[in-house]
Amino acid sequence: MARSPCDLRLLLLAAAAAFIYIQVRLFATQSHYADRLAEAERSENQCTSQLKSLIDQVSMQQEKIVALEEIKVRQDEERAHLRILIKDLEKRSVQKLLDKNVVPVAAVVIMACNRPDYLERTVESILKYQTSVASKFPLFISQDGANGAVKNKALEYKQITYMQHVDLEPVQTERPGELTAYYKIAKHYKWALDNLFIKHNFARVIILEDDMEIAPDFFDYFEAAAKLLDNDKTIMAVSSWNDNGQKQFVNDPKALYRSDFFPGLGWMLTKSTWIELSPKWPKAYWDDWVRLKEVHGHRQFIRPEICRTYNFGKHGSSLGQFFEQYLEPIKLNDVQIDWNSEDLSYLREDKFSTKFGKEVASATPLRGSDAVLKAHNMAEDVRIQYDDQEGFEQIARQFGIFEEWKDGIPRTAYKGVVVFRYNSSQRRIFLVSPDSLRQLGV
């Protein structure tokens, strides 16, 4: 059946419309892709530009790094050169202080930090008595930190060798709320003592702090004690301090004692002892660490009845703890004792234990809750027993002496016995543990 011309025209129109639609869609698609291609080209160009910029920046940074490395190498070389110069100057300074014909008894180091006024007072006190024995006791100031006023004050004294410990590492305390000062102090002590014993090879060192005055016989005392320290290995250190050295509790400037409690505050130790302690030195609280039985073992410390140092440091790392009650009333010895003519052999462990045991045993024993009251009315030496730490603290509080214990040992105690004078008289009060007489061989 033949199609009509009309039908053919409609088919042609439909085909033409479809062709036009396809062409339009193709054009739109080509335009879209052309736009995307153009955008991609722009992005590529931008990325290329940014990459080039980054490459330029990296190149510049690399040049800076190379320059900084060169500067660091030069600075390291300069620092190494300065260290050599400083060591040489220190060596010359020490050599200048030492008399080739005199073997030093001990180096004396003042530990300082940030108190120039305290340091000046300490140094002036020491120089009163040190000048005549300077070759026997070369003097050092070791400063922790970079306080300019302290450094300038230390460098004013040409007869003193200055050392500086600068540690820029942040302090990490072991427990929250601890004062970082105690960590810095312990680190400074180790550094200073390593320098004096190992670098400068001194046989003995006396450690003072920058808030101390010394007695007229300070150096004679330590010179005589040095022989004792060398010959008796049961003595760990010699101290110039008595914790119960307040005016009302002392009388005899010649009296010396052995003690199981480390007094500190002006003390001398030997190189062999330091070689033992240095590798295990604590991060903080070094003095309480020395007081541990596991550290000092069966060794004791020598202490005087009347102090050879006076601590005037109300302001410091311990925040004035105990100052008005215990430190301010301390009596500083004002009598010149010729210690080198004194026979100190009684301080050897076997002799002292026997002698001291007899003195304790011969004291009149007082018992009962009113023992302290009775002691006030006695004319002779008395002995009062405490049963435990609480009992000791109770009795100590009534007399006004130090109540504190460390690692089971009362301050100043020897074999559990704490001895002090009554009202500055020759009378002695002995506070004894239940086991003291047995330990003393009585």
Image (cartoon, rainbow, N blue to C red):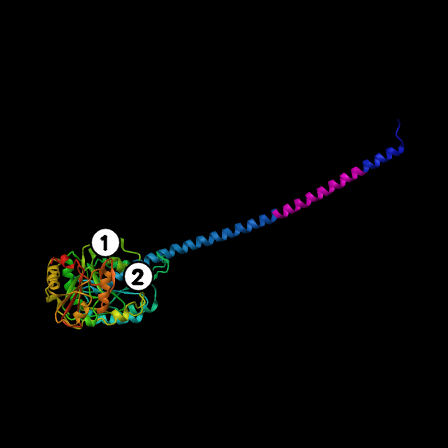
Q: Tell me the quadrant of the picture where the N terminus can be found.
A: top right
Q: Which mark is residue 294?
A: 1
Q: Main secondary structure of the magenta part?
A: helix
**Residue 410 vs residue 315: left or right?**
left
Q: Tell me the quadrant of the picture where the C terminus can be found.
A: bottom left
Q: Which residues are magenta?
A: 17-43
**Residue 157 vs residue 56: left or right?**
left
Is residue 392 among what the camera can see?
yes
Q: Of marks 2 and 1, which one's residue comes earlier in the chain?
A: 2
Mark 1 is surrounded, within 10 Å at the Cα level, by few (under 14), some (14 to 19) or many (20 or more) other residues, namely: few
Q: Identify the secondary structure beneath mark 1.
A: helix
Magenta-drawn stretch contains 19: yes
Depth order, front residue of 357/55: 357
Q: Which mark is residue 128?
A: none
Depth order, front residue of 189/309: 309
Residue 342 position within the rendered picture, expressed as x and y whole percent measured from the top left: 10, 66
Callout 1, which amino acid?
Glu
Residue furthest top in the image? 1
Query: Quarter-wise, where is residue 134 in the image?
Result: bottom left
Q: Identify the secondary structure beneath mark 2.
A: helix
Residue to which mark 2 is pinned: 185
